[in-house]
Structures are given as structure tokens and as C-alpha cells.
Image (spheres, rainbow, N blue to C red):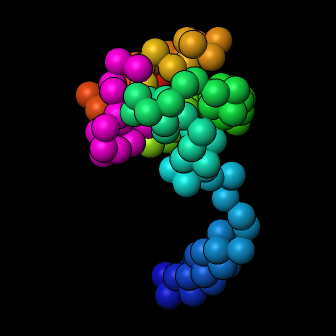
């Protein structure tokens, strides 16, 4: 029995070593990325300015960048957090923003959205 434990231990060490070197799949989109895409929209969703082309460009760019379910869930969680924590955001304007820019997203931008259900 002791003769099989040592080889198994060496295999385990090899597997752990390989896993630490092999890169994981690309990470989900982070909130800093979401913010950079949507920065031109802040004045609009806070009622301090008009809807500008840069905002819709950001919405469309973010929509195109969120290709996987983890990406879409990450974007949803960031939007949910931003909607609840950014001072002065008009939630109904924020929720209608994708539609104004010609983008259909499968959830409402709201602090109460359950992003785990986003596919």
C-alpha cells in the first residue's frame, strides 16, 4: 500500500502544478469595463443631460462584448449595483436606456434584478 501512495502523491503534485500554470478561461466582464462603456450615459440617467451618441455606442459595445452567460451575469450584477449606488439615477430612465439605443437585454436594469437567472 505504501508503494502506491507515493506515486499517487507525485501525480497529485504534478496535476496541481499544471493547473497553476495553465491559464483559466477569459474572466467575465468586470465592473470597471462596464463603467467605461457606460460613462457617457451618466448625465442622461441622472437627468442632467441629453441622450448622446456616445452613450448608445457604449450600450451597443457592452452588449456586443457580453458574449457568454458569465459575461452577461457579470454585466447585470454591475448594472444592478450601479443602479442602486449611483446618486441621482432615475431608475425608469436607466431601465429604458437599452431600448432607446436599439438594444434588447433580457432583464430590467434595477437594484432588484436577479442576475443569476440571466442566460
Q: How many labels does the image show?
A: 0
Q: Which of 66 and 55 is in front in this view?
A: 55
Is residue 116 something one can see in this rendering?
Answer: no
Residue 73 in percent (x, y) is at: 48, 35
Q: Nearer the viewer, residue 86 or 79?
A: 86
The structure residue drawn at horizontal position 33% and vertical position 25%, both measured from the top left corner, is 91
Q: Give the range drawn in magenta.
A: 79-93
The structure residue drawn at horizontal position 33% and vertical position 27%, both measured from the top left corner, is 90
Residue 86 appears in which quarter of the rendering? top left
In the shown orientation, is residue 29 left or right of residue 21?
left
Q: Indicate whether residue 22 is drawn in magenta.
A: no
The structure residue drawn at horizontal position 29% and vertical position 32%, both measured from the top left corner, is 111
The structure residue drawn at horizontal position 41% and vertical position 20%, both measured from the top left corner, is 93
Q: Main secondary structure of the magenta part?
A: helix
Residue 114 in percent (x, y) is at: 33, 28
In the shown orientation, is residue 95 left or right of residue 52?
left
Is residue 112 something one can see in this rendering?
Answer: yes
Q: Which of 14 and 38 is in front in this view?
A: 38
Q: Indicate whether residue 81 is drawn in magenta.
A: yes
Residue 69 appears in which quarter of the rendering? top right
In the shown orientation, is residue 18 left or right of residue 106?
right
Position of 22 relative to 115 (above/below): below
Residue 83 in percent (x, y) is at: 35, 36
Residue 28 in percent (x, y) is at: 59, 47
Amino acid at each position: 500500500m505504501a508503494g502506491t501512495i507515493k506515486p499517487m502523491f507525485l501525480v497529485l503534485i504534478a496535476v496541481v502544478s499544471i493547473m497553476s500554470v495553465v491559464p483559466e478561461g477569459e474572466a467575465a466582464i468586470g465592473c470597471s469595463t462596464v463603467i467605461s462603456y457606460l460613462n457617457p450615459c451618466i448625465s442622461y440617467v441622472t437627468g442632467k443631460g441629453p441622450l448622446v451618441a456616445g452613450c448608445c455606442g457604449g450600450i451597443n459595445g457592452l452588449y456586443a462584448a457580453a458574449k457568454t452567460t458569465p459575461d452577461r451575469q457579470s454585466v447585470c450584477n454591475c448594472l444592478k449595483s450601479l443602479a442602486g449606488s449611483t446618486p441621482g439615477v432615475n431608475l425608469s430612465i436607466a431601465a429604458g436606456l437599452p431600448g432607446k439605443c436599439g438594444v434588447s437585454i433580457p432583464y430590467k436594469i434595477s437594484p432588484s434584478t436577479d442576475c443569476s437567472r440571466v442566460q
